[in-house]
Amino acid sequence: MAYLLIKSLHLALVLFWVAGMVLQAFVLAAADKLPGPALPQELARLRLLRKWERLLTTPAMVGALASGVYLASSAGWFGSGWLSVKLALVLLLAAVHGMQAGRLRRLAEAAGDVTEAGRARLMPVVLAAPVLIILLVVMKPF
């Protein structure tokens, strides 16, 4: 019974984490297209998204990681090939989350006047990694 409760909690936390990352990716992609510094309304939205990221997305990521480790250890999946690939993808998502959170912080604190050479386009990673993770978890191919 406890396993199913933790699994449900894990799924909810993952949903909040990935939804927050997708939202961040869309907002950061839109910020790339701004012709100049952000206007006060845009800065207010960036600050609101940053607050959302600190209060919901990051705690959801930490909770998802902790509950995922518990689920994998209680099911005895450590050592499985599919889990190793899944963990690599999860760590990639965590790194992308950190990159997005840092960029969002810089944009909000610098009044939107941040010039970054070679901005990373992270939307494909944010969208593809969760799909691959779901396929690995459902199919457990190796």
Image (spheres, grey):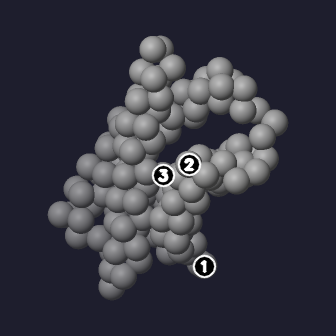
Indicate which disc, 1 or 2, sits on the residue closer to the N terminus.
Answer: 1
Residue 22 higher or lower than 58, as above or below: below
Mark 2 falls on what kind of element?
A: helix
| Residue ID at (47%, 29%) | 7
| Residue ID at (32%, 43%) | 51
Q: Are marks 3 and 2 in contact (CB under 8 Å)?
A: no
Mark 1 falls on what kind of element?
A: loop
Mark 3 falls on what kind of element?
A: helix
Residue at image mark 1: 118
Task: Give the quadrant of residue 23.
Answer: bottom left
Amino acid on which disc 3 is placed: Ala
| Residue ID at (22%, 56%) | 44
Which residue is situated farthest in the left direction here? Answer: 41
Indicate which disc, 3 or 2, sits on the residue closer to the N terminus.
Answer: 3
Amino acid on which disc 1 is placed: Gly
The disc placed on residue 71 is none
Q: Quadrant of the N terminus?
A: top left
The answer to whether residue 58 shows anywhere in this view is no
Residue 34: image location, x then y, percent: 33, 80
Q: Are marks 3 and 1 in contact (CB under 8 Å)?
A: no
Task: Give the quadrant of residue 129.
Answer: bottom right
Residue at image mark 3: 101
Residue at image mark 2: 138
- In the visual, does 63 lie left or right of 82? left
| Residue ID at (53%, 52%) | 134
Residue 96: image location, x then y, percent: 57, 56
**Which dot, 1 or 2, sits closer to the camera?**
2
Count of labels in the image: 3
Residue 138: image location, x then y, percent: 56, 48
Indicate which disc, 3 or 1, sits on the residue closer to the N terminus.
Answer: 3
Rounded to the nearest angstrom, the CA distance separating label 1 from label 2 is 36 Å
